[in-house]
Amino acid sequence: MPNDFSIIGKPMAMVDAAEKTTGGGKYADDLSLPGMLVGKILHSPYPHARIKRMDTSRAEKLNGVVAVATGQDAPNPYGILPVGHDEHALAVDKVRYVGDNVACVAAIDEATAEKALRLMEVDYEVLPAYFDPEESMKAQADLIHDNKPNNLEKDYHHVFGDPEKGFAEADHIAEGRFIANEVTHAAMEPHSTLAAFDIDSQSGKPARLTVWSSTQVPYYLQHKLSLVLDMPMAQIRVIKPLVGGGFGGKSEVIPLEIISAITARKARRPVKITYTREEVFWAHRGRPRTIIDLKTGITNQGHITAVKARVIQDGGAYCSYGVVTILYSGALLGALYDIAHIQYDGYRVLTNKPACGAMRGHGTVNVRFAFESQLDELAAKIGMDAVEVRRRNLLKPPTITVNGLRVQSYGLPECIEKVAEASGWKARKGHLPRGRGLGLACSHYVSGAANSIIRSDMPHSTVNIKIDRDGGVVVYTGAAEIGQGSDTMTAQIAAEVLGCSLGRVKIFAADTDLTPIDIGSYSSRVTFMAGNATLRAAQEVKKQIASAAARKMNCSPEDLVFRDDSVRKRDAHLETAVLGGASQPGSGASVAGRVEGQILRGSLQQKRKDEAPKDSMSFEEAVVAAIDFHGALSGTGSYAPPLEARGGKHKGAGVGPSPAYSYSAQAAEVSVDEETGEVAVHKVWAAHDCGRALNPVSVEGQIIGSVWMGMGQALSEEMVWKDGMLMNPGLLEYRSPSSVESPEVEPIIVESVDPEGPFGAKECSEGSLAATIPAIANAIYDAVGIRLHESPFTPERVLAALRTKKAQKKINLTEGIDPTAPAGFREHGGALWFRGKGPKRHPLDPSRREVHEAARGDD
Amino acid sequence: MSLPQFQLLFAQTTQEAVELLTKYAGKIRVLAGGTDLIPSMQQKLFEPDYVLDIRRIAEIGGIRELPGSGVEIGALTTLTMIEHSEVLRRRYPVLTEAAATVASPLLRNMGTMGGNICLDTRCLWYNQSLTWRQACGFCIKKDGDLCHVAPGGTKCWAAFSADTPAALLCLNAELEIVGPSGARRVPISDFYTGLGDNYRRLQANELLTRVFLPEASADYRGVYRKLRIRGSIDYPLAGVAVAVKRSNGRCADARVAITAVNPAPVMVKGAREALVGEVIDEALAERIGDLAAKTAKPLTTSALTPEYRREMIRVFTKRSVLAAAQS
Ligand SMILES: Cc1cc2nc3c(=O)[nH]c(=O)nc-3n(C[C@H](O)[C@H](O)[C@H](O)COP(=O)(O)OP(=O)(O)OC[C@H]3O[C@@H](n4cnc5c(N)ncnc54)[C@H](O)[C@@H]3O)c2cc1C
């Protein structure tokens, strides 16, 4: 009975829902310690400059300031990737973007620390700066990092199959440039870190370090802290409190996490830093502005013959996850459709802006926007329906794609059929009133990377389970709950395997002293990998319980069924299965009372009492029986992706492979106001293949959230730059959608049951996002016949395209930076912002400021 | 971002408020709903020594019908109260429409009529943190001497970005301002200077106490349309208010005002003359749209390109005029 689960597959509230919704839960910024100081960071006012002189003395003298830390206090470089150790928590000689970290003041309160920042004196030698990636690639001098010629972080050139031959076989070829502008995570919780050193009782010097931080990756944080602070990892404990959303923005070590520790060491007092929203934007690590030159060939029968993509990513001033991002952009051209010939040229470029990194749908989103848009163009050319053309290019799993990705479970066909049906595609597409349209697009994503970023054979996840006489199941996992539900998933899997109620399971997560290593919550890996590790750990303890229980019941362990807080012989189980004893945490009270009595009387007595074999035991009885035999029970499970899933041999082959891929198909219905260019999304039907939905309501939440976030990037979210100044570093001007314009989303869960996922589960929280942007773009095309090549589709971009199409009076926004974009069109936030001389930068002449200070009063 | 240090003062009466304002003139700021003042103080746009909380002054809250002579609105009346006022909705609909578009429901619960009228002008180069402004060398409106929006110029172009004043202009509203020498009344059109920095005619020791909507402006059909990217929260990127009185199918009187595209809310020149006596149709509405676009001077103070915002003033004006004529 494969579907006869008692815990999984049923919608249930997150295990931490109550503490979050009642305000009892503690996030990093809610924490405080005796003697704690507030840290405030001094940021660079220049996009590219050398620090000539720094004088901290005036700041240090300010009453209430305890310490001022600078780069000299911890000069070791670090970075999330082993190949990208190019960051300093505090600048050592150079600053590389407006907002780069220069120094940190620890003071008794925020106002004092801010006042001290105004007293810091720094002399800079301003260097020429690079803001546009295509310009930056031409750089000969004043490089952003000396060891990166042409400001090129990394480039990759991949050829799979024979693209030339593929294009020769095509009946139609489309070529175009697509631009996706820069977006950021905008998680609700700003980053926050509290760092405290124990003082060594013998020497009086700072000893062990404990860091509470809003992180998706506690283990990496522990590792980088050790690197920068020159401390053994064993001396560092990282604890992740509740985290208010990550989306990738907390999936690497963020400067404040190290700066707070450096400053705490210097101040010899605990230091907490919480970013302002502006600082969150500067810390960034979001999705880079991406220029995609895409070429696709298709036959008249609708078969894609070849794809060629040249991708330039504006990565900002540091490597961050950049090398991985640029590889994902190429690798994930594969594994969605059956494409025999792929050419990929990817360039990750450095510019003097905050570093881009991983963001929900890491690497795949922007290229998917281009691909799915171009596929629609081609379908129109050959007169084929968007659904049909996708049907004709499906993979035939199990298979290994031309670029070495192993695909086993593949729910895409069902996703496509389901959204087509739910959206009334056949009847409605092309028959909606003027200005209204339907669009379709597909996407996919990894369920964790098959190769971890630290090259090592260690398991990616390990989970320990302990059960003692009280019958409580304690699970220790390094997996980081960041609001996505990893604790709930862990509890569900443990409870399902052990046949106990959810209330019996207690989760200890993401505390490096207590929990085994898990590489973190990113690339949608937790359910697949930490879930499998939990499954294995639970099976291990279950085996111990089963053998003890089997002895008692005079049967073999295989004959036992664990369910509803009891252990029964298989036949006995059938009876109660009919009765359907849904067991809630409280409902076993009488059983628990008896067991408690037994524990008090001691195990010998109990043994005597239980001499006669029986057909069933309560979970507690079975546990006690096993403990009498073994001592406290413990089990360990770990997960490492299988070798077969780890990809090919070419340079860069490590990124893209995953043990399993999720699939998504979406239809969007939009209307376009042809006079204003405003786009309204009315409804999105989103089918997602998540393998098995362990908690359906949680899967639906992830699908809806992905669609919503994708819609933000499609319509309104964009980081706007002017000469290295971020013009919209706040949630008022950086426009994530509000509830008013959010469409109805109909999530449709497709369960392909993966052979290797825990109970068949795969990822569900990133894969859907990438389909939303092209689905909206395709719907806009259906509504008003314009093909948008640049996201977000702000009303001015849409209007400019409409005017161009109708050959109406041009709206003289600006000239095109994009050769394929409508002529007479320059966007507000696009590349032309980078040109021009921009603001004349005043050296921060103190006398100048004083003049104005004196004149102030009536503003 | 912390708030600068200041001493919080309370006034119970208008007179007390004026006394405090006079005593600390130049060093004090009025706090009503605080929805604009508080974020601005966090950004260190204002660092007053004193903040005067006027919310305890009972005499300047609420909406009162003055039989035969219109309606009086106290400066402390919240935008939510205006949005839901039955008498305003019935008699001065353009104002309730405008009030309902301000910010978000929570901010409208806090934000006041007086604060909306007195709202500081806005600019991408100005409404930023101290650190940010320092990085670009400050600007002419605050701490600096150049304008990033119109480089080379010496004028500040920060955009007046409140919604309701456009509606109040259409209603010929009058403001009551109380100072040490008593109360004075000014038409709202005289309240704004048209400068981005010194945008309002209000002395440091004066308080805005009431708004009067004249009887003569009652019962006009009113429409307010607002350009914004999100359906809530956003300030206007362009706003159009229209009030029209009809008689026998023709336009008997009409006023059109725009906001968020100039350093002050402004009446559209020539709109009234073009509309009065006419049957309002698409072509006429379009002509009014052209007039409005001519009056608008959008610059890169705000999101979206100036050209687009000017274009939207044209479209939104046309639509508002038609909607007001047909409603
Ligand atoms: C996220 C966000 C979005 C917003 N969106 C909009 C929007 O879409 N449209 C819009 O119009 N506004 C918007 N606002 C601005 C603001 O919320 C409203 O304009 C509100 O009406 C201001 O009123 P208040 O009482 O809160 O003003 P306060 O912040 O208390 O005061 C604003 C200014 O007026 C002065 N002042 C207030 N009352 C008086 C008085 N009686 N006499 C003399 N001076 C006075 C204050 O000293 C201060 O300079 C937004 C604000 C935020 C934070």
Image (cartoon, coloured by chain):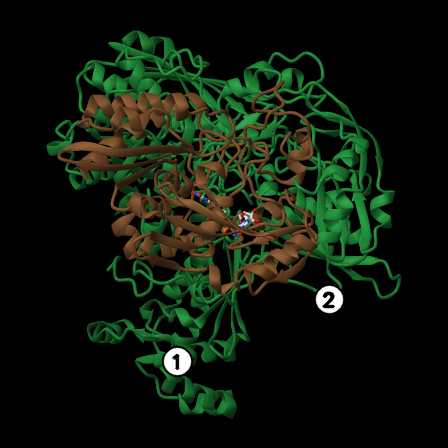
Chain colours: A green, B brown
The Cα atoms of the two marked residues, 2 and 1, are separated by 53 Å
**Residue type beneath disc 1:** Lys
Q: Is residue A552 left or right of residue A390?
A: right
| Nearer the camera: disc 2 or disc 1 | 2
Q: Quadrant of residue A711?
A: top left
Contact, mark 2 vs mark 1 (Cβ under 8 Å): no
The subunit carrying tag 2 is A
Pointer 2 residue:
A34
Where residue B245 appears, x then y in whole percent? 23, 38
Pointer 1 residue:
A552
Residue A595 can be seen, yes or no: yes
Q: Nearer the viewer, residue B90 or A557?
A: B90
The image shows residue A281, relative to residue B14, as above or below, that is: above
- Sequence order check: which comes first, mark 2 or mark 1? 2
Q: Quadrant of the N terminus of chain A?
A: bottom left
Q: Is mark 1 within 8 Å of ligand 1?
A: no
Residue A170 can be seen, yes or no: no
Disc 2: CA contacts within 10 A as few (<14), some (14-19) or many (>=20): few
Find numbered disc 2 in the image and state the secondary structure of the residue it sits on.
loop
Find numbered disc 1 in the image and state the secondary structure of the residue it sits on.
helix
